[in-house]
Amino acid sequence: MTQPKKKTTIILFSGDYDKAMAAYIIANGAAAYDHDVTIFHTFWGLNALRKEAPVPVQKGFLEKMFAKMMPRGADRMGLSRMNFAGIGPKLIKKVIKKHNAMPLPQLIEMAKEQGIKLVACQMTVDLLGLKPEELIDGIEFAGVAAYLADASEGNVNLFI
Amino acid sequence: MTQPKKKTTIILFSGDYDKAMAAYIIANGAAAYDHDVTIFHTFWGLNALRKEAPVPVQKGFLEKMFAKMMPRGADRMGLSRMNFAGIGPKLIKKVIKKHNAMPLPQLIEMAKEQGIKLVACQMTVDLLGLKPEELIDGIEFAGVAAYLADASEGNVNLFI
Amino acid sequence: MTQPKKKTTIILFSGDYDKAMAAYIIANGAAAYDHDVTIFHTFWGLNALRKEAPVPVQKGFLEKMFAKMMPRGADRMGLSRMNFAGIGPKLIKKVIKKHNAMPLPQLIEMAKEQGIKLVACQMTVDLLGLKPEELIDGIEFAGVAAYLADASEGNVNLFI
């Protein structure tokens, strides 16, 4: 009898570049160690899944406001501290390059290549007025029931 | 032999409306799937348990200051980002209503109805100078030992 | 046959005094209940491990900037909210003293005495330009693989 695969399930709630980096580094590590890995993006964590280029969609006023105020894509996210009006992320990206570490967009690419399940929380996609075509390809849409099904069968469960 | 119930144990540390929403949505979902669920409120997460109306209690100077600066109840909490001096929460509540989602006070009501155990961390209640009569009814007071007893028997353990 | 020890593994990402307090209180509680406990410090959480006194080391320009802007040691960390330019931490430390609770530096001491494994994330130590000699003694340096080895064998896994 083969042992069931270990599971790592991460909720990415935060829209901060550094926190998203931590989430994706853990996720990629767990996938490398053969865990079944899911990242469930909710609230501001959805920004990591937005396409960089603006996508023409019909939206109401509130939804337009949210869309405008939220960063489009991983590369535009700010830091949880020492953001300094956008200088912080530039510095972090410099040291990432210097130390041959991976910037967030590449970590997301790698996650997809490793078969990590990237999920967008349907409820918050609706609340923030995002349209599926504004998010990157290859992701799933699901809710708390799907999250619990994954999380309750593994023990590395994080809320980031 | 019946299987033991699954357990979901959430520490709500944050005093942000959106993070508390996430905590209560996961908790209510887990209870619906028949998990034993506990939300352990500590530090700023205690604000979600405060009564909306001011309660006349005797306090020292420091305790009065904390009480004054912290929001009274779930409905007055701010957002973790895009708070904009209180406009953000109003916008979120609008889209919640528009999409027939549940605002935080209702999520807390539902949690109580589902038998979710709501705990206030005794140590931080003391530190922040809160009195039991300032918190909503039907909650328990406990410490880290009680938290660990719950958390170490389940695997959906989150710090929010 | 003896039962394997329970495991509690905490990632301390945050550089906030209150969040670090929560991490160390849970960790010390878990150690008292005989769990194997690890705190894995990454990003801003590394500040809790910095020595208070400046350590003369050779650094590049970016690394000097980071080092300058980050607090040296647990006692200098700010609050996640109500920080008020450093007054918040003073108030918290006052109420901690008043209620005979433990301030963060003492909680860290206690963690070491209880044999809690304190780990500094090697990758973020490098990114932030910290040198091993700037961090307190008795800690280990490791990466995501070591974290996963610990976390995947226990069920109290928190990201703080």
Image (spheres, coloured by chain):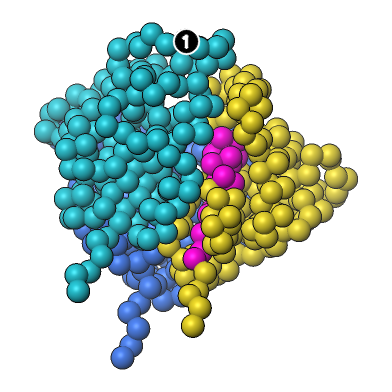
Chain colours: A cyan, B yellow, C blue
Q: Is residue B42 left or right of residue A59?
A: right
Tell me the residue at 51%/64% (across/down): B7
Image coordinates of residue B72 in percent, x first then y, are: 74, 38
Q: Is residue B140 left or right of residue C29?
A: right
Q: Residues within 10 Å of mark 1 (few under 14, many from 20)?
A: few
Look at the image and tell me whether residue A12 can be seen: no
Q: Nearer the viewer, residue C3 or B26?
A: B26
Looking at the picture, tell me which residue is in the foreground, A127 or A138: A138
Q: Which residues are magenta?
A: B6-25
Residue behind mark 1: A58
Q: Residue under mark 1: which chain is it in?
A: A
Q: Is B13 included in the stretch rendered in magenta?
A: yes
The residue at the point 49 percent across, 45 percent down is: A144
> In the picture provided, is A38 more to the left or to the right than B146?
left
Q: Position of residue B83 (x, y in %)?
A: 57, 23
Q: Residue furthest bottom?
A: C1
**Above or below A92: residue B30:** below
- State which quadrant residue B107 falls in: top right
Q: Does residue C38 lie above or below A131 as drawn?
A: below
The amino acid type found where label 1 is placed reads: Gln
Q: Is residue C31 magenta?
A: no
Say which of A95 and A61 sits in front. Answer: A61
Residue B151 seen from this side? yes
How many numbered markers are drawn? 1
| SS for callout 1 | loop
- Residue B24 placement (x, y as % from top left): 59, 46
Q: Is residue C136 above or below residue A104?
A: below
Q: Residue at x 28, y 49 (%)?
A: A37
Percent of width and height locating residue A127: 54, 27
Question: Which of these two is toward me, A129 or C90?
Answer: A129
